[in-house]
Amino acid sequence: MHSGNDTQVLLGALLEMLLIVANIGTALVLFPILKRQDEPLALGYVAARIIESVFIAFGIVSVLTVVTMHQTTGVHPSSMVPIDGALVAVHDWTFLLGPGFVVGIGNGLILGTLMYRSALVPRRLALLGIVGGSLIVLSDASVLLGVFDKGSAPQGIATAPEFVWELSLGVYLMTRGFRPVALERLWSTPVPDYSSLTP
């Protein structure tokens, strides 16, 4: 990474901060509805979105550290290449673990399961989330274990269903909303009281 790219890095960091806001906002908006289907699983979804956001934030800090070093150290950029490379590698790993692995669990498996069970969206659409989440978890675990390289064709293919799921879910909810019959059933069902389980 060279100092000429610092402005692009700052813009990217700003966009990733907006992604964090969207991640947590989405979880908080959906939670009151999803908890009527399965409150522990809905809490798991919120937790997964928060964990994903923590990974993103850690990655942002790593690349912003590179920018700060470029602007304040006064040393020749070529002497900073190893440090830059290490901090960019931190960002890359946080991206694999957060928006990759954790997204597969949270947005794919957990949210897909909640949507499938509740029938708030068509079950075939929700099934895409379950399949997509499973594939992205397997592919990112494979990258982590060195089975194939990050950014390789197998990883790209395995990521595609999750991408389609998230895009399709967003478009469906914006254009159609939740299915009225399923939503009415959820709102007419009392939320289980788990307070008696606490010691």
Image: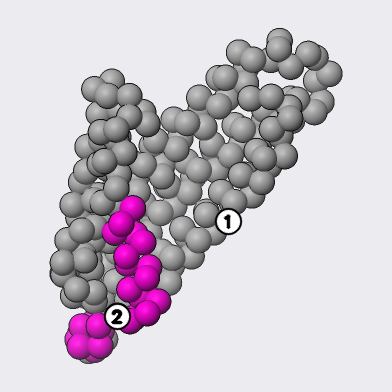
Residue 26 placed where, x, y %?
A: 43, 65
Residue at 29 percent of width and 52 percent of height: 162
Residue 47 placed where, x, y %?
A: 37, 54
Residue at 46 percent of width and 35 percent of height: 94
Q: Main secondary structure of the magenta part?
A: helix
Is residue 77 left or right of 38 when viewed as pictured?
A: right
Q: Is residue 169 magenta?
A: yes
Residue at 54 percent of width and 38 percent of height: 58
Tell me whether circle 2 and circle 1 mark residues in contact (CB < 8 Å): no
In terms of secondary structure, where does tag 2 sit?
loop
* Amino acid at circle 2: Phe
Q: Pointer 2: what residue?
A: 178
Residue 127 placed where, x, y %?
A: 17, 61
Q: Quadrant of the N terminus?
A: top right
The color scheme shown is one colour
Q: Viewer-proximal residue, 125 or 97?
A: 125
Quadrant in which residue 198 is drawn: bottom left
Q: Which residues are magenta?
A: 163-186
Height in image: 162 above or below 135? below
Q: Pointer 1: what residue?
A: 18
Q: Is residue 138 visible?
A: yes
Which of the two discs, 2 and 1, labels the residue nearer the N terminus? 1
Height in image: 106 above or below 139? below
